[in-house]
């Protein structure tokens, strides 16, 4: 039994190795393959948000008994980083309102109407920093957040991870932040109170952002 298990583990390891190598057929060579070029950019510079590895998600209470969660699928932006002088850094993020996605088409269509996001009238949600300050091991981005045609000052605490070599000839940095927003602060007032005092749609929206960025071309 142990020999069978050991053999299975070896086979699985071999299969994974073939997968990672692209499963290229041909004779086995014991010659060492040339190492891939390692590219690691300095943190200071301009970075472009990678939408394929960036998530903007949210959660909101429903009927006071559960949380509906969703995301925005169309996110873009630019980060200008200055490692020596963080106060010279900046970030700008744009989210396409119509890309809201909770996994239920009927609900998503309702969220795009004037009852909620009014995506036709307000096609973008944006954040643009006005200053970045160091706090402890991380930073805080103070800036203008615009949702549903209303702009308010908010502060986003975050830490920068990287730069790291992504193994494909480029470098990446990452950052994560969380914030709680009250939708009524932005004129999104749809909903009513229930007999038990709860709201059919909660006012507080928990927003989580996890992003990756690559060096800007040019």
Image (tube, rainbow, N blue to C red):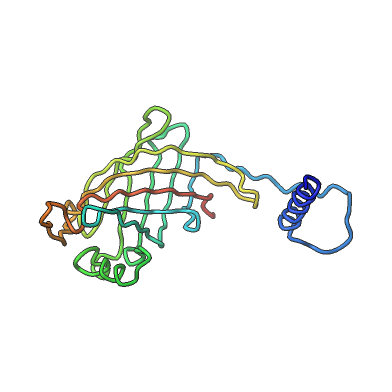
Q: Which residue in the rendered view is the most extreme toward the front?
A: 1
96 to 54, vertically: above or below:
below
Which of the pair 12/130 is nearer the observer? 12
Which of the pair 140/132 is nearer the observer? 140
Instruction: Give the residue displayed 53% in from the left and 50% down from the top.
Output: 214
35 to 132, vertically: above or below:
below
The x and y percentages for residue 42 are: 56, 39
Q: Which residue in the rendered view is the most extreme toward the left?
A: 195
Instruction: Give the residue displayed 43% in from the left and 54% down from the top.
Output: 55
The x and y percentages for residue 99 are: 36, 65
Residue 161 is left or right of residue 100, and the answer is right
The x and y percentages for residue 211 are: 45, 49
Residue 142 is left or right of residue 88, and the answer is left
Residue 116 is left or right of residue 89, and the answer is left
Residue 96, quarter of picture: bottom left
Which of the pair 47/103 is nearer the observer? 103
Instruction: Give the residue displayed 31% in from the left and 61% down from the top.
Output: 124
Q: How many marks?
A: 0
Instruction: Give the residue displayed 82% in from the left and 50% down from the top.
Output: 33
Image quarter in which the C terminus is found: bottom right
The x and y percentages for residue 16 are: 72, 54
Which of the pair 87/168 is nearer the observer? 168
Q: Which residue in the rendered view is the most extreme toward the top?
A: 136
Residue 140 is left or right of residue 160, and the answer is left
């Amino acid at each position: 039994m142990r020999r069978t298990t050991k053999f299975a583990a070896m086979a699985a390891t071999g299969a994974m190795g073939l997968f990672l190598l692209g499963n290229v057929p041909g004779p086995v060579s014991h010659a060492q393959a040339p190492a891939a070029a390692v590219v690691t950019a300095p943190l200071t510079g301009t970075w472009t948000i990678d939408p394929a590895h960036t998530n903007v998600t949210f959660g909101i209470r429903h009927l006071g008994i559960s949380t509906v969660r969703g995301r925005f699928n169309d996110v873009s932006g630019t980060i200008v980083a200055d490692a020596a002088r963080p106060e010279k850094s900046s970030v700008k993020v744009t989210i396409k309102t119509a890309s809201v996605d909770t996994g239920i088409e009927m609900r998503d269509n309702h969220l795009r109407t004037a009852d909620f996001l009014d995506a036709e009238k307000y096609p973008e949600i944006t954040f643009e920093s006005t200053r970045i300050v160091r706090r402890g091991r991380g930073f805080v981005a103070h800036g203008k957040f615009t949702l549903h045609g209303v702009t308010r000052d908010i502060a986003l605490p975050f830490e920068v991870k990287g730069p790291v070599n992504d193994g494909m000839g480029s470098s990446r940095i990452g950052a994560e932040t969380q914030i709680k927003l009250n939708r009524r602060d932005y004129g999104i007032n749809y909903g009513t109170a229930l007999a038990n005092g709860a709201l059919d749609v909660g006012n507080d929206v928990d927003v989580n952002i996890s992003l990756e960025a690559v060096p800007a071309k040019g």
